[in-house]
Image (cartoon, rainbow, N blue to C red):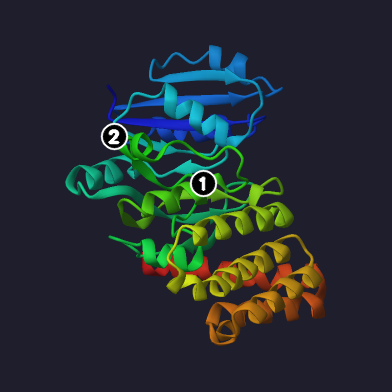
Amino acid sequence: MPKVSVVVPAYNAMKYLPETVESVLQQTLTDFEVLIVNDGSSDEIVEWGSQITDPRIKVISQENQGTAAARNKGITESQGEYIAFLDADDIWEPTKLEKQANCLDNNPLVGLVDAWTAYMDESGKLTGIVMRHTEEGDVYKKVFESCDSSVCCGSSPMIRRSCFETLGLFDESSYIEDVDMWIRIASRYHYAVIKEPLVKYRQHPNNKSKDCQSMLEGFRRLIEKTYRALPTEVLYLRPQSYGRLYVYLAWRSIDNKDFQQAAHYRNLAIANYPQLLLKPWVIRLSVAIAVLELLGFEGYEKVRSFNRALRRRLSFRAI
């Protein structure tokens, strides 16, 4: 039985998939299996997979059913003690599996261990943005307050197999099945985090998170589902959850070059949770919307590119 099973859902992903798999083969922990779940792709993934000689890698094909079903297929076919998910366009740093497996080995209460995540653009160039968090231990109260997990992205966590045996598989009817699962895990297990960027998250036009309407509907379902299971004395936190959701959607709208929709979501966020007006990340959001409205998307991109270059320079100096 391998130590870690790596599950890679893949749908027409050959543009990035070979580089993604290569980042797994470069891991310092070598006791793993890789299950690439071909979710009804029409590209050459089957032919490519047939040429792989590494016995640790297996391509499993199914009819197109979506990411949740592909992840579930990978879980049911896997044998590892721990399970790590890797989107077919993301990349891992070489020590990712080793550091997370060591954490789970040494912390029996932990069900999920996350890692910080660095953003890269479509070509693989780092943007200077790193998703960081430090929430560890019993994080459920913080998680249900926002109805979101602190997990950086779908490619960042490693999870004990026993979590799925206890809680079940991903909800295939949910658009945000990963967030739903991370919250379910937080309700029963502790979190841990490796506080260094071990994942590179690729930004491109086909990112699932850019579909704001589907994300809104998915999070609404999740918020209502979560609060139905909570005591009535914490229901006052629901507006805060919606406020944070609308801030997230406002940022996604900016990525979609739609400042009017961004302003709409920002206003909904403040209407639901007025205290957000004082939060630095909401102030930055309002500045971004104003710059986008004033300079247009081309001018906004120039400002953002300057900020990213400055972040990269400061990061290199810190190293």
Residue 302, by quadrant, is bottom right
Mark 1 in CB contact with mark 2 (< 8 angstroms): no
**Where does the image place residue 186, in percent across and percent down from the top left?**
37, 54
Give the farthest residue toward the front: 232
Q: Nearer the viewer, residue 55 or 175?
A: 175
Residue at image position (46%, 25%) is 35
Q: CA distance from mark 1 to mark 2?
A: 25 Å
Residue 270 lies, in percent from the top left, at 64, 81
Residue at (28, 31) in percent of width and height = 81
Q: Residues within 10 Å of mark 1 (few under 14, many from 20)?
A: many
Q: Which residue is mark 2?
A: 29
Q: Does residue 221 appear left or right of residue 2 in this picture?
A: right
Front residue of 47 and 2: 2
Q: Amino acid at mark 2?
A: Leu
Q: Nearer the viewer, residue 84 or 50?
A: 84
On screen, residue 174 above or below 194: above
The residue wearing badge 1 is 178
Give the mark nearer the N terminus: 1 vs 2.
2
When the figure is inspected, residue 190 is found, relative to residue 25, above or below; the finding is below
Residue 15 in picture, x, y percent from top left: 65, 33
Q: Which mark is residue 252?
A: none
Q: How many marks?
A: 2
Q: Nearer the viewer, residue 83 or 91?
A: 83
Element on which disc 1 rests? helix
Q: Residue at x 61, y 57 (%)?
A: 219
The residue lying at 59 percent from left, 24 percent from top is 38
Residue kind at label 1, given as amino acid type: Asp
Residue 161 lies in what quarter of the image? top left
Q: Does residue 126 show up?
A: no
